Amino acid sequence: MAERQKVLDVKGLRTTFFTDDGEIPAVNDIDFHVREGEVLGIVGESGCGKSVTSLSVMGLVPSPPGKITGGEILFQNTDLTKASEKEMRGIRGNDIAMIFQEPMTSLNPLFKIGNQLKEAILVHRKDWSKRQAHARAIEMMQLVGLPRAEELMGEYPHQLSGGMRQRVMIAMALLCEPKLLIADEPTTALDVTIQAQILKLMSELNERLGTAVILITHDLGVVAETCQRVVVMYSGRVVEEGPVDTIFKDPQHPYTRGLLASVPDTRFKKDRLYSIPGNVPKPGSIKTGCPFAPRCEHAWDRCVTETPPLYDTASDHRSRCFLYDPKEVDANDRTPVKS
């Protein structure tokens, strides 16, 4: 079976914010890719750089103060970091679409649902008539499971429930049949029942339409249920990458192990839920060494003086930790860094 082609290939991406306090590398030299028809999960705590990564791909990093300062974002062999704003407007919503966290702030409260959907089509399909755009909008609303599609076209966002608004956003993202869909925590503002429906819908659409999906979330349960591969981010860097099953069964990076240990398990009663010690460092505050070292039980002197690269721990599994440096032999004898 032929290997599926890469839809998106990010290499050495750096996105920096220039502030009064200095330069803050929100995304620091990250690499990842997503293939045709694949669902890739990007996980990590708040502030790790997940959303900035997605905004960088879409060319939506607010400037000033933000700017892509290095690396490549290859979309079907075209480097988006070198694309003009006019070229990006042609790609956004057409070839690459995005579902944002909060649908109420993403939909314009002053315009009817139908007008917003039709506008998204007509911007990219110059040869379509308004009648064709109207029919396409209804078709996509029905595809995402919205009842009374014709009636909803004439309603305003505030007249819809949170779950219905999120379905409208998904329908809008899929109107032009994009090759890549980025979903930035699409279920954060929804209750658990609607969350399950939205995730099921996204999986079905991925299988039916073959759209590559990047799912950005902090919820490991969502990743386990939806994704084939996962990228774990910490402090603006990729610290682990691999197939979902492999990472859940055999996590290699201490941070990934901590995340998985922090997930509540109702099968076992514990006195106290595990939490990773310490706090997430302020972006840019750690200049040298591994940013997770102050919180890591395995850290030793090398971890605070050198930044570890991504080591291959298997053919399709990588971890950014000196525990997997072939030159290091015995991890058990290492002396933890003293605070």
Image (spheres, rainbow, N blue to C red):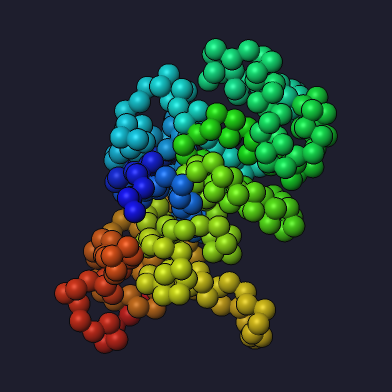
Q: Residue at (52%, 51%) from the top-left corner?
A: 216
Position of 140 relative to 23 (above/below)? above
Find the residue positioned furthest to the left: 327
Q: Quadrant of the C terminus?
A: bottom left
The x and y percentages for residue 142 are 72, 36
Q: Residue at (53%, 20%) from the top-left corner?
A: 124
Q: Residue at (43%, 68%) from the top-left corner?
A: 247
Instruction: State whether residue 266 appears in this view.
Output: yes
Q: Residue at (58%, 72%) from the top-left corner?
A: 263
Position of 182 relative to 308 (above/below)? above
Position of 242 relative to 284 (above/below)? below
The x and y percentages for residue 39 are 48, 51
Q: Nearer the viewer, residue 12 or 16?
A: 12
Find the residue positioned furthest to the front: 1
The x and y percentages for residue 47 are 50, 53
Horizontal side of 185 relative to 316 (left or right) equals right
Q: Nearer the viewer, residue 63 or 54?
A: 54
Q: How many marks?
A: 0
Position of 75 relative to 25 (above/below)? above
Horizontal side of 323 relative to 238 (left or right) equals left
Horizontal side of 258 relative to 263 (left or right) equals left
Q: Nearer the viewer, residue 231 or 125?
A: 125
